[in-house]
Image: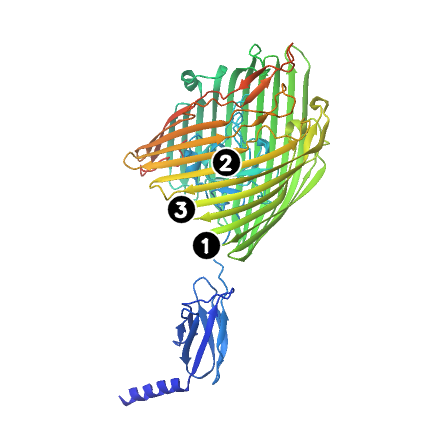
Amino acid sequence: MRAYFLFSFLFFASFLQGQNIRGTVTDQKGNLLPGCNVSLEGTYFGASTNVDGEFEFNAPMNDSATLKVQFVGYKAFKKRIYITNAMPAFTITLKEAFNKLNVVTVTAGMYGTGESVDAVVMNSLDVVTTAGALGDITGAMQTLPGTSTNGESGKLFVHGGSANETGTYIDGILVHAPYSSSAPNMAVRGRFNPFMFSGTAFSTGGYSAEYGQALSSVLILNTNEMPVEESVNISLMTIGADLAGTKMWKNGAITATANYMNLKPYMSVMPQNYTWNKQPEAFGGAINFRQKTAFNGLFKVYATIDQSNLSQQQNLLGTEQSTQNINLTNNNRFVNTNWKGLIAEKWMLKGGASFTYNENYYDLTHTTLTETLKGSHAKAMAIHEANEKFHLCFGTEYFYKNFAESYQVKNLAADSSAFYTDNKTAAFAEAKLYTSTKFVINAGLRAEYSSYLAQANVSPRISMAYKLSKNNQVSFAYGWFYQDPINTQLIAHNQISYEKATHYILSFDKQMNKRTLRAELYAKDYSNLVKYTNQHANAYTNNGHGYVYGVDLYFRDAKTIKNGDYWISYSYLNSERNYLNYPYAAKPSFTNAHTISVVYKHWIQKLRSQIGATLSLSSARPHNNPNQANFMADKLKPYSSLDVNWSFLYRDNIIFHAAFSNVLGANNIYGYNYTPTPNSNGTYGRTEILPSAKHFFFVGCFITLSKTGKENQLDKIN
């Protein structure tokens, strides 16, 4: 007992001889921080800051001690202090901790999902279940702001750019022929099966220096990595059938797909706007191979083979009395390989290559035309995370392209043929710097050299983002973008140069509890566009120019309506170009001033069904009517289409899916074909360019066979 009182006396005596330690804690902006934990390291002496950020506690006399201040979201503060009789009040400033989970990201111009995407506004389920898209990735992207509706094409037209200004990449490797082939004025589809991809990124501009040869936009597709379990997927559809199977082993897997498509049954019951000698038919297959390797790496091979054919009659010369047979056979082969792995703690290496072979053979009434494209792309790049705030990416690329064209008039022995070959080398580097969790800046540089053009280009690019608050941020992107002229121009003339576009994008993003709001302003300047006065005389120059500016609005809400999800996209666009054979600057025929998309999806639990609808509206596109004095002074009808779909989960592994397009029966006209010469009254006759049919319907049954029996294709229905 005496020992206890002696210990207590000495303990309290030390307090009587101790000193008062006090101070104030703030952040870097001077804001007071209540609730901070303040202590002497390795002791029980300390306190918490009050509502005014102040702390105060007693500590025993000592030569020195370490004062430690901790607060969630900030770096720990440590300072060696000397406890003396006259202790001053401390003023302590805490620095914000760098939290990668809460770091700001650049979202200007970027939409999509997948490992390469920071701004997620569409997941993979959205891509394949959007009404009207019919399982086409390109079709789903057209419900996002920044795109223009061109029903006679089916391709992506982005921010006032033509379809050839959008580049498609699979696992970072260029695809030279991303679309299927079709007759003139008939819409095409994306060539690749959406079943094979886990993520989709869509950039409307201002994208990374890693990507080139795209004046307006890039579509980035990421193939599946390791599957969860083995399965067999059977798809039975009104337009054909599809069979896919996945086999797994310890460190790898392979998925093989075979498909057949024939539109004859559908076209026999749905009235057509054109006469078909042979309805479109296609068959093909794909393989997706994955193997884990050393360095925590993954090697992937994605290969496809496709063949299609059709025969149609069209009034291409602008008069009902003059029709032309169009017989088309397409052969396509594509192989994409890539590998990525961690070669060191902070170093990742990526590499890949692709090969494309695409041949279109047109057998017309009086002539034949063969177009053959062979293309390759190889890329190697390294990513170095020097520290948590500085990342560096750099790489090199090689592109090969051979394009040949053969034209022959029937019953004549002679033919006309031409080709060109280009070898292009490129290098790029990009640095990402986080000054804090609220501000990031990306600076990149890309350089290319073409052996065919014998010219080089250098593209500086920069983007940045600042987080205004926890849920709000602004982003900005700027850059130069170059692209080769199209193949038919290059084959005629090798003295023309790269076309150029300069991008400016300012974006605002707001996240609100399963709600997303984005507003984006953009402008684009075109220069060095190809122009000619007489195409057949090969009088090509790079004297063309143009501009685009507009605004994109996007709102998505998965909160307000229970089991419902919808998004609304609106785009305003103003553009003029003086290029090709334009006599002066005018609005291009592929641009819409106003475009609106409303997409809605609803899950009905009692019916085990998801229903969806997409409303697409576009203002009238300009077109040139030779019967008018002014160039591009006429306009088409506004475009409208209401599309619906329904997915029924019959069993855990069986899904029925139905889709119907243009349910209101809008009479959409995509343009006109005019007679080459006027009639006796001086008037040019014309025929309408119409969709293949006013409506399209689709019914399919999707069956998945697996060990558990519960796997299904709900995320793959098309």
Residue type at the position of mark 3: Lys
Q: Give the number of the disc on residue 470.
A: 1
Q: Residue 416's spot in the image, x, y percent?
A: 68, 19
Q: Secondary structure at mark 3?
A: loop
Residue displayed at 44% across by 84% down: 61
Q: Give the number of the disc on residue 596.
A: none
Residue type at the position of mark 2: Tyr
Q: Residues within 10 Å of mark 3 (few under 14, many from 20)?
A: few
Going from N to C along the chain, the mark reached first, 3 or 1, is 1
Q: Considering the image in quadrants, where does the C terminus appear?
A: top left
Identify which residue, 615 or 172, lies in the foreground.
Answer: 615
Q: Residue 501's spot in the image, x, y percent?
A: 64, 39
Going from N to C along the chain, the mark reached first, 2 or 1, is 2
Residue assigned mark 2: 302
Residue assigned mark 3: 514
Above or below 249: residue 401: above
